[in-house]
Image (tube, rainbow, N blue to C red):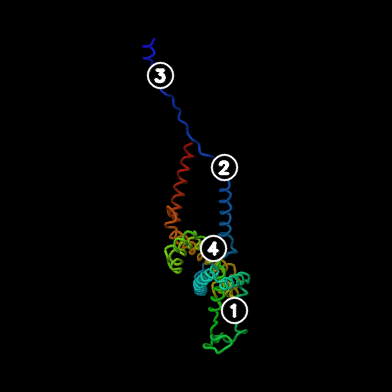
């Protein structure tokens, strides 16, 4: 009996195991495919309407797109945008630092400035500056209620370009101040404490530790402001500065039959400018993401390649089922 039990072998080691191969089916998304088809149909209808509707006059659009008058206005738009963006960002940084200052005077003045210029429409600011010479014939620097050391003729100083840049910069600084302040507040408090514990000067702490980290939060928000500034330059037409929109308006008055293609020309150039700014934004954000992310975000070309590769793999998988 003992020998028979000792010589017994478990059945699991002698009999072959029966295994079944099961294929995991991917989850179907019919709603996603239907929505995608509807969107593609709508896009095709829009493109077909734009291409075939004679009202858009695409031959006149091609004629006006690179005309010297339009390009001169585009150059003025770029100049006003660059100057206003630089001065507005510089003013926004100073205002943000004033709001974060321990001085109640600086905090109050900064708050009032931001409150005022965020409340007043930009067109009102531009028109007020354009008529500023009616209020003050001359501007002077000197002792308050005392002698003046320097005197300026306001009518000669305030050219159309100066009025446009100053008005846009004053308005832009108010919004940039809140963007910069939000970026500074987003930096972890431990960074401030560590910099102070090392005995670093306040200016060095801000320029080398706090502000570079704040730029990751400032960049996307300020680019939105910059895109709004590009479109806001169209208002300088009302202070007699012929920018891109002003040139289009002027040519539309001279050639009333070409109003629609001229508006399309302005739309196309604004789309190009904002697209260039968006591309620059992506690479600036990518640059300041170093050290904060384990892997840098893919570039648009890398996203397209990955998307096409995933789409091909998905099509092959569903075709094999």
Image: 316 above or below 298: above
**Circle 4 crowding by C-alpha within 10 Å: few under 14, some 14–19, many from 20:** some
Number of numbered discs on residues: 4
Front tag of 2 and 1: 1
Residue position for label 2? 30
| Visible residue check, residue 176 | no
Residue contact between numbered discs 4 and 3, judged by CB atoms under 8 Å: no
Q: Which mark is residue 182?
A: 4
- Which of labels 2 and 3 is toward the front? 3
Task: Name the spot of residue 243 as percent of width and height, x first.
Answer: 54, 74
Q: Can you say whether 224 is above or below 126 in the image?
A: above
Residue 23 locus on image (x, y percent): 47, 33
Nearer the camera: disc 3 or disc 1: 3
**Spatial separation of the CA atoms under disc 4 and disc 3:** 72 Å
Please give the label number shown on residue 129: 1
Look at the picture and state if 27 lies above or below 153: above
Position of residue 114 measured from the top left corner of the image (x, y, whole percent): 59, 70
**Residue 6 placement (x, y as % from top left):** 37, 14
């Amino acid at each position: 009996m003992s020998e028979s039990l000792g010589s017994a072998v478990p059945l699991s080691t002698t009999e072959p195991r029966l295994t079944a191969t099961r294929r995991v089916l991917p989850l179907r998304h019919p709603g996603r495919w239907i929505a995608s088809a509807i969107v593609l149909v709508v896009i095709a209808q829009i493109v077909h309407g734009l291409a075939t509707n004679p009202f858009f006059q695409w031959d006149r659009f091609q004629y006006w797109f690179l005309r010297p008058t339009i390009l001169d206005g585009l150059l003025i738009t770029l100049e006003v945008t660059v100057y206003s963006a630089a001065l507005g960002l510089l003013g926004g940084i100073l205002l943000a630092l004033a709001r974060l200052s321990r001085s109640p005077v600086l905090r109050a003045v900064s708050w009032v400035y931001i409150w005022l210029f965020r409340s007043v429409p930009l067109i009102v600011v531009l028109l007020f500056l354009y008529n500023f010479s009616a209020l003050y014939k001359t501007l002077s620097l000197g002792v308050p209620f005392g002698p003046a050391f320097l005197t300026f003729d306001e009518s000669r100083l305030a050219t159309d370009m100066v009025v446009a840049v100053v008005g846009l910069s004053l308005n832009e600084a108010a919004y940039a101040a809140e963007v910069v302040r939000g970026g500074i507040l987003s930096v972890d408090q431990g960074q401030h404490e560590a910099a102070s514990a090392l005995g670093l000067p306040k200016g060095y702490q801000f320029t080398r530790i706090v502000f570079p980290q704040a730029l990751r939060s400032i960049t996307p928000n300020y680019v939105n402001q910059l895109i709004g500034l590009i479109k806001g330059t169209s208002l300088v037409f009302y202070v007699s500065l012929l920018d891109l929109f002003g040139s289009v308006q002027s040519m539309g008055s001279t050639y009333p039959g070409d109003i629609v293609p001229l508006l399309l020309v302005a739309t196309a150039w604004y789309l190009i400018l904002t697209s260039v700014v968006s591309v620059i934004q992506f690479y600036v954000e990518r640059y300041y993401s170093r050290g904060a992310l384990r892997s840098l975000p893919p570039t648009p070309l890398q996203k397209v390649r990955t998307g096409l590769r995933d789409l091909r793999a998905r099509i092959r998988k569903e075709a094999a089922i």
